[in-house]
Image (cartoon, rainbow, N blue to C red):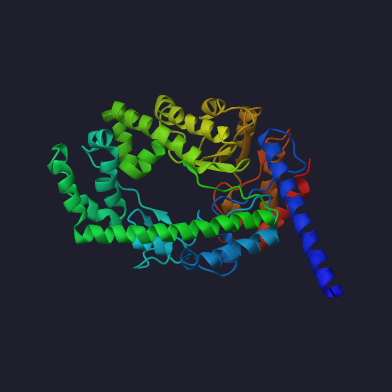
Amino acid sequence: MNSNSETTTQNVVCSSLQNTENLALREQRILDAVSLKEPDRVPILAPTTNAYPYFAANHSMAQVTYDIDLALNDIRAFLTEFQPDTGFGAGSCFEGYGPMLELADCKCYLWAGMPGNRIPEDSIQQFIEFPTLEDGEMQGLLSNRDWTMLTKILPRAYGVFSPFAKINTSGAYFPKLGYESIAFGFMQPEVQDAIEKLRQLGGMWGAYYGKTGAFANEIEQMGFPCMSGIPGMVPFDWYSNFLRGTMNASMDLFDMPELVQELLQIVIPIGVGNIKFREPKRNRFTYIFMHKGMDGFLSDEQYEHFYWCNFMPQVEAIIASGSIPYIFTEGPYNTRFKFLKQLPPGKCVVHFEDVDMALAKRELTGVACIAGNFRYQTLARGTKEQVVEEAKQLLDTCAPGGGYMFDLDGGMYGLPRENLEALYGYLKDAGKY
C-alpha cells in the first residue's frame, strides 16, 4: 500500500469515528432536553417540513416531487453545510411522490408539477379538504368499515379505486349469490385495470421506502440522528380532515356526537396497532400533528371528550415503543395547558406554532420539553439583526433549566442564506449552558 492510500484510509477511519462521536453527542443532547435536563447546548432541530435545501440548490418543488435522488442530494448538502442536531429524510414535502400520486389519480392533494400545473412549481403540496364520507353514510361505515372504505371513501379520494365503487354487493347477504356477485364484479375490465395499477403502486412505494430507509441510515452514519418517521394522527383530526371535512365534522359533534365517538373509539386501537406494527426507532421522534385542537375551535368539553382522550392512547403507545412523542400543536394553544400538563413527565416534546412561550415554559416545566414558536417570517423577511434578536428572546425565555429545543414555528422554505447562517451561528454560541 502506498502512502497516499494509507493516508486516504486513515482519513476515512477518522471521519467515520468523528461522525460516530457526533451522532452520540447530538443524540444525548436531544435526550437530555426531552428528559427536562440541561444538555451541553440547546439542541437545534431541523424543521419537520424543510424545503429550504431545494430552493438553496435552485431546484423547484416540481423537480424534487418527481426526482427523489435530487431531493436526497440537496438534503445531504444542507446537513453538511449547516450541521443541525437532527437529520431528516424525504416525505414531508412529497419529495419523489409525483409518479405515485399520478398513477393513483389522487383527488385530495395538489402538488407541484402535477398534470395541468394547478399550483406553482415552487409550492409545497396543498391538501384539498372535502367529505369522502357523505351525509347518511356513518352507520354504514360503523357496520361495515372495510367495505365502505373500499367502495365509497377511497374511490372519492383516489381515482384508481373508482371501479370498486361499481361492484354490486346487494347479493352479499345471500349464501349462494353473495360471493358470486362480488366475484363477477372483480372480473370487470376496469376493476382488473385498477388491480394492476395498485400492484404497480405497491412496487413503486416499496422501492421508494427502500431508498428513503437506506438514506435515513446514511445520514445517521454522517453523524445526524434521523428523528423523522411515519407520523401518528389524532383520531378526531383523521375524521375531520379525511372523512367529513371541517364544517361537517363540527356540525356532527352536535348532530350525532354518539356516532362520532363510536367511530373514534374504533380508530384508537387501529392507530395504536399501527404504531406497534411500525416499531418506531428507539430514541427517535414520532410526530403527531394537532390540526384541529387550537384555541377556540373546540370547547374545553369537546376538546377533552373528542380530542384529548382519544389522542392519549397513541401517546402512551409511542412511549411504550421507546420512541418520543413530538406533539406538534398548530395555531394558538394558550388555553390548552391544563390538558398538556397531563402528559407523562419527561417523555414528550410539545412544539408550538403560536403561543406565549413564557406561559408555556412556566406551565410545562417538569412536564414536557418545549420547542418551536420562532417565526419563519422573521427568517424569510427580516434582517440578520432581527433574526438574532428574536432567537435571543426565545433562548432567554425558554432555555434556563433545560427542557427546551430550538425549532421554527412551522416549516422552512425559501429565505436568505445569510439569515440562516446568522441564526445557526448565534444558537451554537449562545445556546451553551
Q: Quadrant of the C terminus?
A: top right
Left or right: 133 with respect to 410? Answer: left
Determine if residue 133 is in view: no
Q: Quadrant of the rendered structure where residue 8 is?
A: bottom right
Left or right: 385 with respect to 379? Answer: right
Residue visible at 77% across and 50% down in the picture: 21
Q: Quadrant of the N terminus?
A: bottom right
Q: Is residue 37 above or below residue 201?
A: above
Q: Quadrant of the rendered structure where residue 30 is?
A: top right
Q: Nearer the viewer, residue 39 or 11?
A: 11
Residue visible at 34% across and 48% down in the picture: 129
Q: Nearer the viewer, residue 30 or 303?
A: 30
Left or right: 145 with respect to 209? Answer: left
Determine if residue 201 is in view: yes
Total residue callouts: 0
Pinpoint residue 274: horizontal percent, then vertical percent. 46, 40
The residue sitting at the front extreme is: 176
Q: Nearer the viewer, residue 3 or 104?
A: 3
Q: Is residue 99 above or below residue 265?
A: below
Residue visible at 53% across and 42% down in the picture: 287
Pinpoint residue 332: horizontal percent, then vertical percent. 50, 38
Pinpoint residue 62: horizontal percent, then vertical percent. 46, 66
